[in-house]
Image (spheres, grey):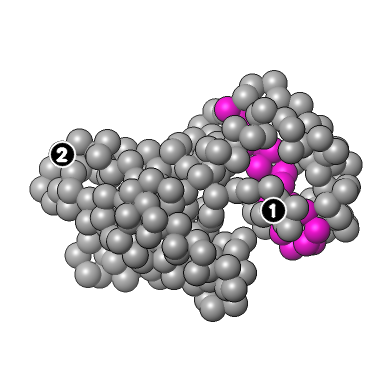
Amino acid sequence: MADRTGYVDVIKNLLDQGYLVTAPDYEGLGAPGLHTYLNTDSQARAMIYAVMAARALVPEAGARWAAVGHSQGGQSAIGAGELAAEGRGLTYVGAVAFAPGTAITANVLIGVAGLKGWAPYLGYMAVGIRATHPGFDYGRFVGADFLNLMPSAEQDCWDQWFINDTMRVNPTPATALSANWQQDPAVLEFMAASDVGSRTGRGPLLPAGNGRRALLGVPTVHTASVLARYAGARTRV
């Protein structure tokens, strides 16, 4: 099977160097329930617990471990560094985050809402809100552009959701987002739960990007401020 993401090549390279690699699903993927999309602590713990489980299965594996991820996985890797003390019996050595997700702010959401190639992420975010707030009305967050498509957002993978389900949507901030989303308590809690970089990492962090979009959702011109946030939390970058 062709590896369109490049992840298989990364994993193979690590395996060839003698590393034990775990690639866990997040909550709600491959199991009942909704995906806790962009919930930093949920994703970070998925990484940490996967390493603990792998060592239980392979007792001869070493205790030293690192977190590596891209995009949402990059956010998870940074979060894993922040929560690394929860890894009983493990020695965390650092993280590599390729174009990592950053903390979701009102400005980020408004910017995403007007971009055809990015606005569908709002649907996934809405699912993430309902995952931690059962019964959450999607109409409190997404607007008319995506509201009727939310059953697909709950179950479809990236390529189907972005290419098949939402291809005909031409979003604007006024139609992709609901009118009062910035005052909604559940939305505000979701934004807070997406926070990454404000807590001290337990090891060094190497964020990497492609130059044009060095950090996911953050144009290169703003990268310095994001890195300053990590430094302010006393994370070695």
Residue that label 1 marks: 107
What residue is disc 2 on? 89
- Image quadrant in which you'd find residue 235: bottom left
Where is residue 8? Give x, y as percent.
Answer: 42, 65
Q: Between residues 178 and 200, which one lies in front from this camera angle?
A: 200
Task: Please rate how many residues cluster around mark 2, counting C-alpha atoms within 10 Å: few if below 14, some from 14 to 19, many from 20.
Answer: few
Label 1 crowd (10 A; few <14 / some 14-19 / many >=20)? few
Q: Secondary structure at mark 2?
A: loop
Instruction: State whether residue 18 appears in this view.
Output: yes
Report the mark closest to the observer, 1 or 2: 1
Q: Answer above or below: position of 234 versus 181.
A: below
Task: Give the distance between the C-alpha atoms of the residues marked 1 and 2, in whole angstroms.
Answer: 40 Å
Q: Position of residue 159 (x, y in %)?
A: 67, 57
Looking at the rendering, the stretch of residues picked out in magenta corresponds to: 113-132
Where's the C terminus, which quadrant?
bottom left
Image quadrant in which you'd find residue 97: bottom left
Percent of width and height locating residue 52: 25, 39
- The amino acid marked with disc number 1 is Asn
